[in-house]
Image (cartoon, rainbow, N blue to C red):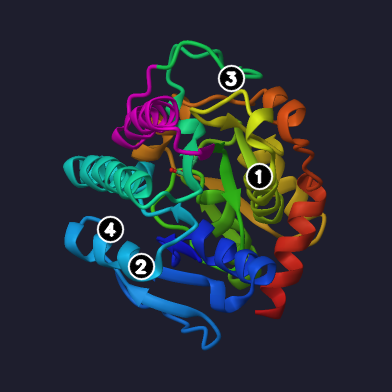
């Protein structure tokens, strides 16, 4: 059986659907600290606080999972508002899951990292898998430390834990939660509802991004890859495209010619974005497990507008 912890989040919402489609809905249990807002009747759901050690152990004993996906975390912007909570959830949540997964002989564990593990002194363009990493957000260094824990549990306990450094994820099904890249989601909602959007990132802030369908397919591809093919046991660099708010606005105007984009100039998230790469080199993922994203800027914008119009 498969357990997804943090199933209400931007990744968890869509990963749960993909895993149910792949393994059958009765094999997948979704868990989060609160019930989902739109309850999906076909989904098996249980509330779980991943930091409640007793409850987490009881879940492993009851479900004897073969795979565990740990997605629960505080993201970059929220993490700067609640730094100690972010460290506790992102770190203790992971270590608790790694320990129980070894004890209960879980065959595969997935845990998301982020391009937030790079910092001001990391190369900004085509940021490589290995380089200087001096993240200056709690989220970023909790993900960097988490990568170290994942590699440690693989080497010391032979736990098959796999991870991806997601860039900013663009999706329409689940609301994003406290990230710095969320402007690239809000902009579509506003373009359709009010016709205007004020970006909290400056017009030339280039960031690596990925459309959610590519991200989910890539995650399943990584989890299906033969263990012996994987050279990276910290976390794989991954990207699909990179763009600036200005470029995204121009793409939206191809569909909504009157769309107005303005910029605020004192948002704390600008400092976070400025510490991150502008683009990522994901050669290791391409070579080790056949990573090959399909959504470019125009395809992503088309998909977002088409689906949000229907909503
Ligand atoms: C965030 N969406 O903004 C997340 C992600 C690379 C960005 O980690 O915090």
Asked which secondary structure carries label 2, the reply is: strand
Magenta residues, start to end: 134-163
Label 2–label 1 contact, CB within 8 A: no
| Label tally | 4
Question: Given contact means CB atoms under 8 Å apart, are the residues at marks 3 and 1 in contact?
Answer: no
Mark 3 → mark 1, Cα distance in angstroms: 17 Å
Q: N-terminal of the two: label 2 or label 3?
A: 2
Which mark, residue 50? 4
Mark closest to the chain's N terminus, 1 or 4: 4
Q: Residue at x 71, y 37 (%)?
A: 241
- The picture quadrant where one finds residue 150 is top left
Q: Earlier in the sequence, mark 2 or mark 1?
A: 2
10 Å crowding of disc 4: few (<14), some (14-19), many (20+): many
Q: Residue at x 55, y 38 (%)?
A: 164
Q: Looking at the image, do the residues carrying marks 2 and 4 touch, with CB atoms under 8 Å apart?
A: no
Is residue 58 rendered magenta in the image?
Answer: no
Q: Is residue 297 above or below residue 254?
A: above
Q: Is 282 on the left or on the right of 117, as rendered?
A: right
Q: Where residue 67 sits in the image (x, y, percent)?
A: 50, 55
Between marks 2 and 1 in the image, the one whose residue lies nearer the viewer: 2
Q: Main secondary structure of the magenta part?
A: helix
User: Which residue lies under the disc numbered 3?
Assistant: 129
Q: Is 45 on the left-hand or right-hand side of 88? A: right
Q: Relative to residue 34, is residue 27 drawn left or right?
A: right
Q: Residues within 10 Å of mark 1 (few under 14, many from 20)?
A: many
Disc 3 crowd, CA 10 A, few/some/many (<14, 14-19, 20+): some
Residue, disc 1: 210
Residue 182 lies, with reference to residue 290, above or below; the image says: below
**Residue 83, horizontal then vertical, whole percent:** 21, 40
Determine the secondary structure under disc 1: strand
């Amino acid at each position: 059986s498969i357990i997804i912890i943090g199933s209400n989040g931007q990744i968890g919402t869509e990963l749960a659907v993909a895993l149910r489609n792949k393994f059958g809905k009765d094999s997948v249990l979704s868990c989060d600290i609160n019930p989902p807002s739109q309850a999906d009747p076909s989904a098996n759901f249980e509330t779980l606080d991943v930091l409640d050690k007793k409850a987490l152990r009881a879940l492993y004993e009851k479900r004897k999972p073969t795979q565990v996906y740990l997605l629960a975390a505080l993201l970059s912007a929220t993490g700067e508002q609640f730094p100690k909570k972010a460290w506790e959830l992102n770190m203790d949540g992971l270590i608790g899951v790694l320990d129980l997964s070894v004890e209960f002989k879980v065959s595969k564990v997935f845990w998301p990292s982020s391009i937030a593990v790079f910092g001001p002194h990391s190369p900004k363009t085509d940021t490589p898998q290995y380089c200087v990493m001096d993240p200056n957000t709690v989220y970023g260094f909790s993900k960097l430390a988490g990568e170290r824990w994942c590699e440690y549990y693989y080497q010391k306990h032979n736990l098959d834990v796999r991870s991806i450094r997601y860039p900013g994820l663009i999706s329409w099904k689940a609301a994003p939660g406290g990230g710095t890249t969320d402007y690239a989601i809000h902009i579509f909602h506003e373009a359709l509802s009010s016709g205007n959007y004020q970006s909290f990132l400056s017009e030339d802030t280039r960031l690596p991004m990925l459309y959610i369908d590519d991200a989910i397919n890539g995650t399943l591809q990584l989890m299906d890859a033969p263990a012996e093919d994987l050279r990276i046991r910290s976390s794989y660099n991954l990207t699909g495209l990179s763009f600036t708010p200005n470029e995204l606005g121009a793409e939206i105007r191809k569909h909504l010619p009157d769309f107005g984009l303005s910029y605020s100039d004192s948002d704390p998230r600008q400092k976070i974005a400025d510490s991150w790469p502008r683009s990522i080199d994901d050669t290791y993922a391409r070579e080790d497990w056949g990573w090959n994203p399909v959504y470019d800027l125009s395809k992503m914008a088309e998909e977002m507008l088409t689906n949000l119009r229907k909503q």
